[in-house]
Structures are given as C-alpha cells and as structure tokens.
Image: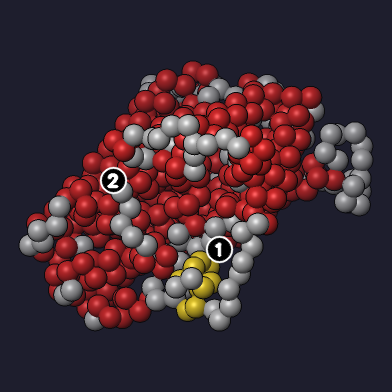
C-alpha cells in the first residue's frame, strides 16, 4: 500500500531524513492506483464470501466441518530435543552480533542489519512462517539455550513461583509494551535505539526465566505466547505423539481450552494488528484533529497512539465476549461465559494472521530486497559477500496498475481467507460443544455477524487513503 504500510521502523524515518524520495513517490503512486481500483466491488465480494461460508456451514452436517480439521499423522517420529538448545545458543549469538551492528554499524536503518532483521526478517517473515507452517520459534528463540547452559553450569534452581492469579497477565503486558514501542515510539527503527531495546528485553527475559523457570516463557513473555498461538495455526504439528499435517487451524481446534489470560491475549493479537492499520488512515488522523496531508511526525501522536492501542484492544475483547455470550443465550447453552470466551478465542487467530500478511506484504516486497543488499554488504563497506554486484532495490511494481491490482487482491485474499477459516473453526468447535448442527449454527449467529462485519472493516482498511 502506501509508505505507511512499511514495518514500524519506516514510519519514523522522516525524523532522521533517511527515507529515499523515490520510495515515497513510488508508494504514493501505488496508493493512488489502489484508489482507482473498483475496491467497492472487491470489498463486497470478499464480505459476501465470508457470509456464504457461514450459510454453507449451517446447512452442512456437523461431521463435515469436523472432518475439515482432522489431521493426517506421519508414520515417523522425530527426536531432536538435544539440538534445540544448541540452535537457540547460535540464535542468541546472532542476536548479539546484530545488537553490536545496531550500536556501531551504519545509522541508516535501510543499511543497518538490526532494523532489517527485527522488522522484516523476524516480525514480517518469521511470524508469517510460524503461522503457516508451524512452530519454528521453539528452535530459534534466543533464550532457552543460554538459560539451560546457565542452569547447568551454576546448578541454579528455580528461585520463585509465579502466583496463580497472574495467569498470562505478564504475557499480555509485555506484548502490549512491544506493540507500543512498535506503533507509538517516535523512532523504533533507529539502529542504536532499537539495539538498546532489544538488548534490554533479552536481558529482562533471561533473568525472569532464571528466577521463575520455564513457566515465565508461557505466562510472562509475550513474544513466546504470540509465537505459540500462531504455531497452533500451522499446517504441521504433532498428533498422537507423531508429526501431523492438516488444514490451517487443526491444532487450535484440537488443543485444550486456553485459560482466560491466554484467550484475552489471542484477541489482543487481532486488536493490535487492526490498530496497526487503523492508526495510519485519514479517519484516525482526522479524529485527532491532524491534517493527513501535513502529518507532523510520529512524535506528535505518541500519546494518542498509545491510548488508541489500549482502547481498541479493550473494545475488541468486550465485543467478542458479547457476541459469544449472545450466541450461547440464543442456543440455550448453560456454559459459563468465561469458559465460552476461552473456547472460541482461538478462532480469532486466523484473522490476526491474515491481517498480518496483508498489512506487511507491500513492505516485504521492498524490504526483502534491502535484506539481500545488507546480507551482501552487512556494514556498508563495499563488500560483495553474495556476489550480487551493484544491487539496486526496485519499486517499479508499485507504478503499474496491473501489478498493484495483483498485490491488493493478494492482501484482500489473505484477509478473506483468515475470516473463512475462522468461521469454519468456530462452527467446528460449536458442533463439538453442543452436539447438534442446528444449535451450533444458532450459537454462532452473533459471532458470524461479527466476523462478516470485521471482514468489511479489514478490507476497508486496505482500501482507505493513508496519511502517515
């Protein structure tokens, strides 16, 4: 889309004068082409697709929906428990190298390895791979290996137990802290600033894991819980102790009901991703009294974006809980509302992943090229490690209406696919809970309306003019 759809590091680059004029011009042109597309027709078609999915599931036997999420097990077992800590230690070493580059390397985020590694390779690409394929983060996270080595060398026991009342509150808090840095900080892409935050967060998590043990990893570390949730959508996972393969969401449908804090976290993932798009629109800037054509810079909207992030998430949690409660009342179920909220919260995850893919697709098409350029010359010293020679980043595909149409329809397709899978997951869970397809369809009516309207909202975000 427009320049505002770059990962958060690029939203603050104008502060440092680091954003190349030709990039801004290319992406402004692409947004202009989007405004020329028949987006109203595309939005109507996408919303109708989700609505028809709801109707089709209501008419089909419940066994058909259940079969959609039945995995196929492979006839082999993979034992590699001892390898994961080694890979984790290597990942930690790579992270330390990137932090060093952030502190002492080039000041331009487009040539410094750290911002590209964090906001493009990790946040855009790796999170997407995690949601599409399965749990790769358990191998790559930079904590489990160093913590295991420290415990073994020092024979250090777990010092404290996390109180039960905390639940996943620590994970929600740390993830919202990360989101505020990403969306509200004036310069999240500045290499030195980002290096300080990354190093501080690693050290904080390392100490917490030593103090509270592995429980902190799932109850206090927001990034780990986010990755775990997305992994539950992966095509590949474990079933019956063996590797398995199935439709996106099969693991989330089969897993045990999450606790209340984990369920809230799932909804917050969607709320944060949605606000990441909303805070760039003309509508949001007008709400704050800012002329979108004269945007004063991120430093002028820090407080507004931080408050908006919290309000958006609180509103989404409330609305989602209300739709689940109304559905139970319609179907005559006697399930506790909190447990029902927890039961259906995983159905939010495909929508969150679809938004993530759609929102960052355009930035990845450009930033992926910068990643290759930095890999070729990590410290901007004129090296040619990959043999790419003189490497030019192109944005030409944003200057042709046909390619822009393909990109926009790909983004819209990700949003619609996420909602379709979410509707199917919710119906499968309802059939399993109520045992009757008619009652299941009735219980899903309010949630289905919510998902159809949210599809409309998501596609509107993609088509809306932006001013950041």
Q: Is residue 48 above or below residue 340?
A: below
Relative placement, left or right, of 166 versus 399 is left
Name the N-terminal-most of marks 1 and 2.
Answer: 1
Q: What residue do we see at 42% from left, 58% from top? A: 350
Image coordinates of residue 145 in percent, x first then y, are: 64, 45
Which residue bears the numbered disc 1? 133
Image coordinates of residue 127 in percent, x first then y, are: 56, 50
Neighbour tally class for label 2: few under 14, some 14-19, many 20 plus, Cα within 10 Å:
some
Residue 287 seen: yes
Relative placement, left or right, of 466 versus 169 is right
Which secondary structure, mark 2?
A: helix
Which secondary structure, mark 1?
A: loop
Relative placement, left or right, of 121 versus 348 is right
Viewer-nearest of labels 1 and 2?
2
Q: Is residue 73 above or below residue 161?
A: below
Q: What residue do we see at 49% from left, 68% from top? A: 238
- Between 381 and 33, the residue placed more toward the observer is 381
Q: CA distance from mark 1 to mark 2?
A: 26 Å
Tell me if label 1 and label 2 are in contact, CB under 8 Å: no
Which residue bears the numbered disc 2? 260
Neighbour tally class for label 1: few under 14, some 14-19, many 20 plus, Cα within 10 Å:
some
Q: What residue do we see at 55% from left, 22% from top? A: 186
Please identify the residue farthest to the front as the structure is shown. 155
Image coordinates of residue 339 in percent, x first then y, are: 21, 52
- Between 452 and 128, the residue placed more toward the observer is 128
Relative placement, left or right, of 86 versus 354 is right
Q: Quadrant of residue 265?
A: top left
Q: Is residue 41 above or below residue 11?
A: below
Image coordinates of residue 118 in percent, x first then y, are: 64, 39
Q: What residue do we see at 54% from left, 34% from top? A: 210
């Amino acid at each position: 889309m427009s320049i505002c759809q770059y990962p958060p590091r690029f939203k603050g680059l104008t502060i440092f004068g680091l954003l190349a004029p030709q990039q801004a011009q290319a992406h402004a042109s692409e947004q202009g082409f989007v405004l020329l597309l028949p987006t109203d027709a595309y939005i109507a078609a996408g919303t109708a697709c989700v609505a028809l999915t709801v109707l089709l599931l209501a008419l089909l036997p419940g066994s058909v929906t259940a079969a959609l999420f039945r995995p196929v097990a492979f006839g082999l077992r993979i034992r590699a428990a001892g390898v994961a800590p080694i890979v984790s230690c290597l990942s930690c070493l790579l992270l330390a190298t990137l932090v060093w580059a952030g502190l002492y390397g080039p000041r331009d985020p487009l040539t410094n390895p750290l911002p590209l590694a964090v906001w493009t390779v990790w946040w855009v690409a790796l999170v997407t791979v995690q949601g599409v394929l399965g749990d790769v983060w358990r191998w790559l996270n930079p904590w489990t290996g160093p913590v295991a080595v420290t415990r073994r060398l020092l024979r250090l026991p777990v010092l404290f137990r996390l109180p039960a009342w905390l639940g996943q509150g620590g994970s929600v808090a740390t993830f919202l802290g990360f989101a505020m840095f990403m969306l509200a900080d004036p310069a999240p892409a500045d290499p030195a600033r980002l290096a300080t935050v990354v190093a501080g967060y690693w050290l904080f998590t390392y100490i917490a894991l030593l103090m509270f043990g592995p429980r902190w990893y799932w109850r206090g570390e927001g990034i780990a819980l986010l990755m775990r949730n997305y992994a539950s959508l992966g095509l590949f996972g474990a079933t019956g102790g063996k590797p398995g393969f199935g439709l996106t969401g099969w693991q989330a449908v089969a897993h045990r009901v999450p606790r209340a804090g984990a369920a809230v976290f799932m909804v917050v993932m969607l709320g944060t991703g949605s606000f990441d798009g909303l805070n760039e629109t003309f509508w949001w800037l007008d709400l704050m009294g800012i002329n979108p054509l004269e945007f004063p810079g991120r430093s002028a909207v820090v407080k507004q974006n931080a408050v908006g992030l919290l309000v958006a998430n609180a509103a989404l949690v409330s609305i989602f809980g209300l739709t689940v409660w109304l559905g139970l009342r319609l179907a005559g179920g006697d399930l506790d509302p909190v447990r029902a909220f927890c039961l259906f919260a995983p159905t939010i995850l495909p929508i969150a992943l679809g938004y993530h893919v759609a929102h960052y697709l355009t930035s990845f098409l450009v930033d992926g090229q910068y990643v290759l350029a930095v890999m070729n010359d990590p410290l901007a010293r004129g090296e040619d490690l990959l043999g790419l020679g003189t490497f030019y980043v192109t944005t030409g595909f944003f200057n042709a209406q046909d390619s822009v149409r393909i990109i926009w329809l790909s983004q819209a397709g990700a949003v619609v696919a996420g909602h379709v899978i979410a509707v199917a997951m919710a119906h499968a869970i309802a059939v399993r809970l109520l045992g009757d397809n008619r009652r299941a369809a009735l219980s899903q009516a309010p949630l289905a309306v919510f998902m159809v309207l949210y599809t409309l909202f998501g596609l509107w975000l993609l088509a809306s003019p932006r001013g950041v």
